[in-house]
């Protein structure tokens, strides 16, 4: 096993042995090699980099990781048990490997392509790295160099896909200290619509590392309802980039929920490039113990008449640490932008910590923009009201805590998904005594 | 049912209630009237057990027990209900969930099992008719986005479901138009019962046209300065509250 700072070495061997997919594709080989050089030059982001000020990857760099997963013995029952939605088109990745056996890819609805990235790379050239900045401090370069698997999702023009798609990423825990590098590509053609769930789970409580990049391309009038649920082990590292580009009249509703992980970092970048496009960028983090979650979001309003709404909420206990940095940039020509952003935090202990920074950079003059953040405890009046209705103090506090968190889900229109996510949250924050 | 004896209470060291005496028997409806700032809400909050009020003298006996030593939830479970002057919004908690949790809390204290889902719905639907509330309100968050009148009706709905022994209604009439006022009053009237006492706090006498009290008390500067029957309210309507400073102190019902 090697430390992360040294991992390029074993992987250059891996690459030479062509275990990484797409060895036959010249364009991909050169992309990987460029990225490798980039990662070797830049290394892990240091704390002196502004965007990484509150999140140190030092501990991650001290762990020893392997990239060789033992064949896993995850059963269908185990996989079904952790899946969020039963009735879904499901692509399952276990320990970085696509599992045909655990996936549900039969009877895909017309217009839907859902396949493992490893066998879809020939279709990926125009999508890969089209949405992210590989130069940016972070792990995008490492991901580009080492991406081993992921989901390729394509929805044809005018197709409305009924059932949600769930990308289920399982860390079986059968290989200690396993690092995986995943890349999901999501492309919606004109006037298509789908619900997508990215779901990350661990079956055991051991150290692991998920490095994932999701790229999203929405054509005119496309609608993507997107959920990310990160529920990995409390010893897990999760570093993710999620980036989208939207054409005119398109809609991206995304909800990013962090429950697990020792350290989780999400860099989310929404680019509104077509008029009348809209993004809802919501998120929730529920932290306890020594968990650390850092959400960096950025929305670019690049053209006139685009709208964004962003609500991030956090409930923190123990000695957990959350970071929220939300940037909204309204570019010079982006008149009539309507942008709203807020970050609200509920602190349940004296020892937890939040660094919150909502930011707006506005270069247009005819816009409607608002942002704010709050950090606080439960509301005394609400607490008294519930107690005056007979709920004991512990139940009243639990109910209000649950309510604070679950409010983030209330905008979700897809009922089965909202219900499933509410259940997950209730499991974590029981609302009754 | 309720006996308040020489009750003194302060907020932030400032004395607000300055010796309240009052006896409420089962089945009685008492109105407490008084100008803004008289201490009406302070009295209701002290009775319901809200934090931040310090009782410096006196006692409150409820069903033979010292009410003031109980936690707010213990009072509620024993049948004390406060309809809030400013109903509280709770985003993320649906009305139906609240009603069920509250009812089960009371039932648990009474040694009963949790309410059966179907019985509960039947009960709630029935009580919603009482306050003319549409069923969609069950699935909305508690008071969130409700109009002033809807919020007040929602308080009465909670009362109707919980069937308290002692209901304290703090300005349940304020901010209501005449139709809403009638609805609320009809709801409350339907809940009048031999074993239930109601303390109605109001600033205006018009509520008393619709819910006729057995006794009326005038509260001013933390004391009950006059008590009488419903005629007292009519007098007040004519002369306003200006005379109360001249009235002899300490009269009680
Ligand atoms: N929490 C509080 N902090 C400070 N003063 C208070 C508080 N609650 C009430 N008061 C004061 O006590 C007095 C009585 O208030 P309140 O009981 O609300 O009157 P009413 O309900 O009769 O209008 C007022 O002077 C009010 O300012
Ligand atoms: Mg008042």
Image: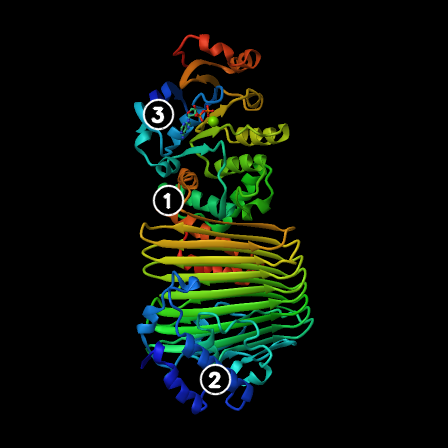
* Crowdedness near tag 3: few (<14), some (14–19) or many (≥20) residues, C-alpha within 10 Å: some
Task: Give the position of the N terminus of chain B as an image quadrant.
Answer: top left
Read off the residue under disc 3.
B10
Query: How many angstroms separate mark 3 from mark 2 (CA)?
Result: 75 Å
Q: Observer-nearest residue: B9 or A390?
A: B9
Please say if A15 is above or below B81: below
Please say if B58 is above or below A8: above
Please say if A301 is above or below A387: below
Task: Give the position of the C terminus of chain B as an image quadrant.
Answer: top left
Figure coloring? rainbow
Read off the residue under disc 1.
B108
The structure residue drawn at horizontal position 36% and vertical position 78%, both measured from the top left corner, is: A178
**Chain hosting mark 2:** A
Q: Which mark is residue B15?
A: none
Q: Observer-nearest residue: B150 or B3?
A: B150
Q: What is the x, y in percent for residue A96?
A: 43, 79
Q: Residue A33 carries which label?
A: 2
Q: Observer-nearest residue: A298 or B240?
A: A298
Q: Is mark 3 on a helix, strand or loop?
A: strand
The quadrant where residue B18 appears: top left
Please say if B93 is above or below A3: above
Q: Comparing marks 1 and 3, which lies closer to the viewer?
A: 3
């Amino acid at each position: 096993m090697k430390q992360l700072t040294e991992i390029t070495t074993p992987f250059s061997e891996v690459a030479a042995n062509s275990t990484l997919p797409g060895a036959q594709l010249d364009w991909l080989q050169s992309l990987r090699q460029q990225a490798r050089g980039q990662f070797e030059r830049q290394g892990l982001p240091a704390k002196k980099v502004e965007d990484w000020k509150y999140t140190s990857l030092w501990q991650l760099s001290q762990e020893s990781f392997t990239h060789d997963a033992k064949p896993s013995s995850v059963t269908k029952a185990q996989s079904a048990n952790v899946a969020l939605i039963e009735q879904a088109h499901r692509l399952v990745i276990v320990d970085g490997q696509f599992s045909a056996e655990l996936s549900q890819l039969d009877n895909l609805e017309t217009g839907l392509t859902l396949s493992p990235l490893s066998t879809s790379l020939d279709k990926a050239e125009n999508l890969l790295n089209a949405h992210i900045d590989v130069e940016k401090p972070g792990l995008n370069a490492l991901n580009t160099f080492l991406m081993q698997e992921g989901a390729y999702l394509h929805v044809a023009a005018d197709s409305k896909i009924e059932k949600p798609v769930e990308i289920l990423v399982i860390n079986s825990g059968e290989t200690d200290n396993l690092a995986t590098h995943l890349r999901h590509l999501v492309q919606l053609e004109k006037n298509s619509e789908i619900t997508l769930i990215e779901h990350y789970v661990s079956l055991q409580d051991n150290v692991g590392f998920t490095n994932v990049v999701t790229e999203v391309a929405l054509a005119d009038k496309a609608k993507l309802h997107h959920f990310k649920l990160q529920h990995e082990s409390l010893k897990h590292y999760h570093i993710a980039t999620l980036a989208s580009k939207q054409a005119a009249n398109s809609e991206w509703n995304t909800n990013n929920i962090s429950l697990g992980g020792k350290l989780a970092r999400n860099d989310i970048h929404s680019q509104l490039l077509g008029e009348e496009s809209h993004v809802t960028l919501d998120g929730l983090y529920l932290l306890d113990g020594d968990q650390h979650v850092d959400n960096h979001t950025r929305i670019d309003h690049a053209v006139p008449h685009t709208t964004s709404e962003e609500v991030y909420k956090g409930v923190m206990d123990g000695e957990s640490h959350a970071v929220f940095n939300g940037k909204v940039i309204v570019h010079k020509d982006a008149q009539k932008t309507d942008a709203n952003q807020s970050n609200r935090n509920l602190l349940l202990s004296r020892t937890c910590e939040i660094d919150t920074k909502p930011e707006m950079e506005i270069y247009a003059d005819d816009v409607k923009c608002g942002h704010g953040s709050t950090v606080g405890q439960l509301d005394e009046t609400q607490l008294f009201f519930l107690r005056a209705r007979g709920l004991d103090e512990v139940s009243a506090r639990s109910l209000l805590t649950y309510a604070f968190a679950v409010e983030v889900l209330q905008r979700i229109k897809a009922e089965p998904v909202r219900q499933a996510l509410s259940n997950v949250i209730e499991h974590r924050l029981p609302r009754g005594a | 049912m309720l006996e308040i004896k020489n009750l003194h209470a302060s907020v932030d060291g400032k004395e607000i209630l300055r010796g309240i005496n009052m006896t409420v028997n089962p089945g009685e409806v008492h109105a407490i009237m008084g100008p803004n700032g008289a201490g009406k809400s302070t009295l209701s909050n002290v009775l319901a057990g809200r934090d931040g009020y310090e009782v410096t003298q006196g006692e409150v006996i409820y069903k033979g027990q010292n009410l003031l030593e109980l936690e707010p939830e213990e009072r509620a479970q024993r049948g004390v209900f406060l309809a809030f002057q400013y109903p509280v919004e709770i985003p993320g908690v649906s009305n139906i969930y609240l009603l069920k949790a509250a009812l089960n809390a009371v039932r648990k204290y009474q040694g009963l099992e949790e309410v059966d889902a179907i019985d509960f719905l039947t009960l709630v639907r029935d009580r919603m008719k009482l306050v003319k509330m549409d069923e969609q309100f069950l699935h909305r968050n508690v008071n969130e986005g409700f109009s002033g009148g809807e919020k007040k009706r929602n308080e009465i709905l909670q009362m109707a479901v919980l069937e308290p022994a002692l209901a304290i209604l703090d300005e349940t009439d304020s901010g209501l138009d005449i139709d809403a006022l009638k609805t609320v009053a009809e709801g409350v009237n339907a809940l009048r019962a031999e074993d239930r006492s109601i303390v109605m706090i109001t600033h205006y006498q018009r509520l008393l046209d619709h819910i006729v009290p057995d006794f009326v008390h005038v509260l001013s500067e933390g004391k009950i300065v006059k008590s009488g029957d419903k005629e007292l309210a009519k007098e007040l309507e004519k002369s306003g509250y200006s005379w109360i400073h001249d009235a002899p102190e300490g009269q009680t019902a």
